[in-house]
Amino acid sequence: MRMKFYVEGSLRKGTAFLEVREDERTINRVAKFLEKQNQIKTEQFESILRYVTTQDQCKSSLLLAYFGETTKTDCGICSYCIGKSRLQDSFPVKEAIKAELEKGPKNSRTLEEKLNYPKEEIIFALREMLDNDYIRLDLNNTYTLKK
């Protein structure tokens, strides 16, 4: 919005803007900066999403890559590394659970009593078998093999 004014006794006329003027001399200086900031924020957000959702790479190597560094070995202490080592170690537990469930439905306590493995390993193997649709959990909290 603009307003025209005339000062009496003067030949001077002018235009005064009542709002901040937005043209190529004012807005473009800020627009480039804002576009760059938006790009940086988008890249940071995508990096966070990649870190959270990636399940096939060491979390420490992802962090190092974010800061421009590299490593040739996995850390061994992040969720990926721990899961990977448990995955390799859980095969015998899964086989033992499978053998017990072939005899009939069992709950986790019965499996703990019958199997000679730590409770944490049995629970981890059961979760993994549930996730992979190999077994099912019914309303009585008993596990059965899926056919």
Image: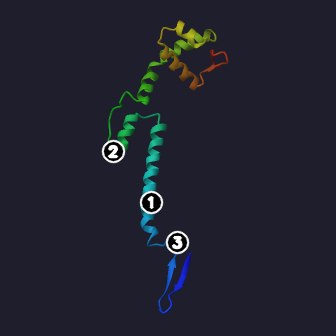
Element under disc 2? loop
Q: Is residue 63 left or right of residue 106?
A: left
Label for residue 19?
Answer: 3
Q: Earlier in the sequence, mark 1 or mark 3?
A: 3
Q: Residue at x 62, y 8 (%)?
A: 103
How many numbered dots are placed on residues in this image?
3
Element under disc 1? helix
What amino acid type should be assigned to the residue bearing mark 3?
Glu
What amino acid type should be assigned to the residue bearing mark 1?
Leu
User: Separation of disc 2 and disc 3 at Cα?
Assistant: 46 Å
- Seen in the picture, residue 130 relative to 117 is either above or below; the reply is below
User: Separation of disc 1 and disc 2 at Cα?
Assistant: 25 Å
**Residue furthest top in the image:** 114
User: Separation of disc 1 and disc 3 at Cα?
Assistant: 21 Å
Which residue occupies the foreground of this view, 34 or 133? 34
Q: Which residue is mark 2?
A: 68
Q: Position of residue 72 (x, y in %)?
A: 32, 35
